[in-house]
Amino acid sequence: MTSYLDFPRRPLLAIDTSSAQGGIALYDGHRLSLRSWPADRSHTMTLLSEIHHLLDRDSVAVRELAAITIAIGPGTFTGLRVGFGVAKGFHLATGAPLIGVSTLEATALPFAICGMPIVAAVAAGRGRLAWAHYQPKSGRLIETQAPKNGTFDELVAEIDGGEVIVTGELDGEQTDRLTRLERAYVPTTALRARQPAALAEIGWGRWIAGQTDDAVTIEPMYLSR
Amino acid sequence: MLGLETSCDETSAAVVADGRRVYSSVISSQFEIHRAHGGIVPELAARSHITAIIPVVERALHESGFERDDLDAIAVTQGPGLAGSLVVGMNVAKAMAYALTRPLVAVNHLEAHIYANWLTDSKVIPPEPEFPVLCLLVSGGHTELILMAGHGRFQHLGRTLDDAAGEAFDKGARLLALGFPGGPAIQERAGAGNAAAFELPRAWLSGTYDFSFSGLKTALLRLTEPMRLASDENPVDVPARREASRPFREHRLPRFATDAPIADLAAAFQEAICEPLAVKTAQAASAFNARTVVLAGGVAANQNLRDRLLQEVAIECGPEVRVSFPAFAYCTDNAAMVAGAASWIIRRGDLAGWEADIFPRLPLL
Ligand SMILES: [Zn+2]
């Protein structure tokens, strides 16, 4: 079997099934290969085929993966269960270590370079949001407020006044309201979209640092409301 | 063959060869989590599958004496069952099959229950059940009478029109304050009771092979209402599933005086469920010239049902028709039956692709 020809090192597989847009990536800290697709509610039917296309294109076998990094949410429970099922199945078959990464941290990462505090949000159903606060520090993100589930008004109350970038899953009305706040910066819809590349980047950093998770006990993030 | 089963509240994995010989069968029960709620809470079930699956599969492999590379195929329950639970097993199985480059077999949970009758723990493999096989499938979600002309050839003869037999046991147990799950609780209490002490109705639905248990439940409620102690504001005839869908609510039972005839009531209730099941199964076996009658599903563990079925088949069909029961361990949900059924499914050339989905309401036919 040919092995990871284009990857100088064994790559890591990143899996994000925390929302309707599925995302996967292969990354070795240098070379990146990724796919993103509208899975809607069909993660079970699409995820493994998408992974197959990605691995096949780069001639990587599952047993050659250095690790698997998985978005742990917050997000849709069914989607997360699909991602966890596949990640744990790969672990069972090959022993690949698992690395769980907050979906919110992956959402915030692309804006870390701006040096400003970041609030990352994802839709949590019934008009609610889940969000967390981050402070960039030498290219990485420090979580300054843990993920929580709340209303949009609660989110606005938390950020009103301070200089902040707000990113993630926000609808048009929410974007308008945030933009009217004096020191809040809201990137455009396209730039706010979460990328599997960001997940892979965080996962790779943890892998290099030896920070893998317990494959047995790792589970989706469940926020109480 | 490695099988995974996560359709409800048990996380289970097993290694079975050729549809017959069980090398290992591991079940991690969430029983304690759900008992406090008087029923299965789907969200809690899905959550525990996620953390139980790796140790369960690793133990099943270890106990079987095989390595993961020895596996020929991976089998998994596709439905029916709870969506959030099925999704975990399906995706773990798919990923394992893909990574090990082995075929994936998607198994109907009901078919798996039937094929539990083909399983054995013994090195000496007993003869297969002879076709035509008449199967009474009785569990918490199903009560069906099925004729099996050969492997994979199923014909539906009858079903329950309302509650499943296992559901009836659960509801009866709640009315008698015997707890959850109802089948074993009622069987235990009925052991010391006299079934003839109370008259409970049977819905014979003659001319069909269908069943009905809702009238029986109502009759038991009427019979026990005057016996209840006061300060019992709790409506107990709420269907278990609806109650369970409101998560994290503690479950409360009615209270009876210590001298209430609970054992007699349990015995009468159990007999009123088992008698029509046994009689109609025996009648169908005779009408369709079955060579073997098999029991399947969680309620197949009920001793009274086993005894009654043996009796009725002997009366209706004579001694040449064999009656077979799965080993107790393979009556309730387990992965050995899934791995077992998968071997017969592979022989029909029926493999699942990477796009295979789950079907929470999958019927047998
Ligand atoms: Zn079952």
Image: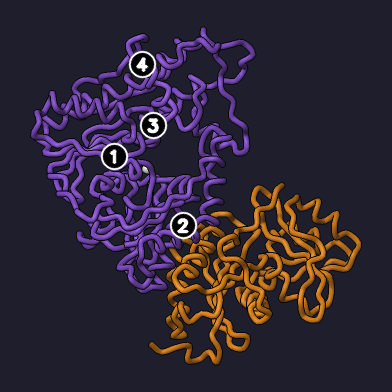
Chain colours: A orange, B purple
Residue corresponding to mark 4: B268
Which quarter of the figure has residue B154?
top left
Q: Distance between the residues labelled 4 and 2?
A: 39 Å
For marks 1 and 3, the one nearer the N-term is 3
Name the amino acid type tagged 2: Val
Q: Distance between the residues labelled 1 and 2?
A: 24 Å
Q: How far apart are marks 3 and 4 (CA)?
A: 16 Å
Q: How far apart are marks 2 and 3 (CA)?
A: 26 Å
For marks 2 and 3, the one nearer the N-term is 2
Left or right, residue B194 beside residue A176: left
The reply to whether the C-beta atoms of the residues labelled 1 and 2 are less than 8 Å apart is: no
Chain for numbered disc 1: B
Chain for numbered disc 4: B
- Residue A25 seen from this side: no
- Residue at image coords 19%, 25%: B311
Question: Residue A108, image x and y in percent?
Answer: 73, 70
Residue corresponding to mark 1: B296
Residue corresponding to mark 2: B56
Q: Quadrant of the N terminus of chain B?
A: bottom left
Q: Are marks 2 and 3 on the same chain?
A: yes
Left or right, residue B58 beside residue B336: right
For marks 3 and 4, the one nearer the N-term is 3
User: Can you say whether B299 is above or below A38 in the image?
Assistant: above
Secondary structure of the residue carrying tag 2 is helix
- The circle on residue B324 is none
Q: Which of A98 and B78 is in front in this view?
A: A98
Q: Are marks 1 and 3 on the same chain?
A: yes
For marks 1 and 2, the one nearer the N-term is 2
Q: Crowding at label 4, few (<14), some or many (≥20) Cα neighbours within 10 Å? A: many
Residue corresponding to mark 3: B166
Secondary structure of the residue carrying tag 4 is helix
Name the amino acid type tagged 1: Ala
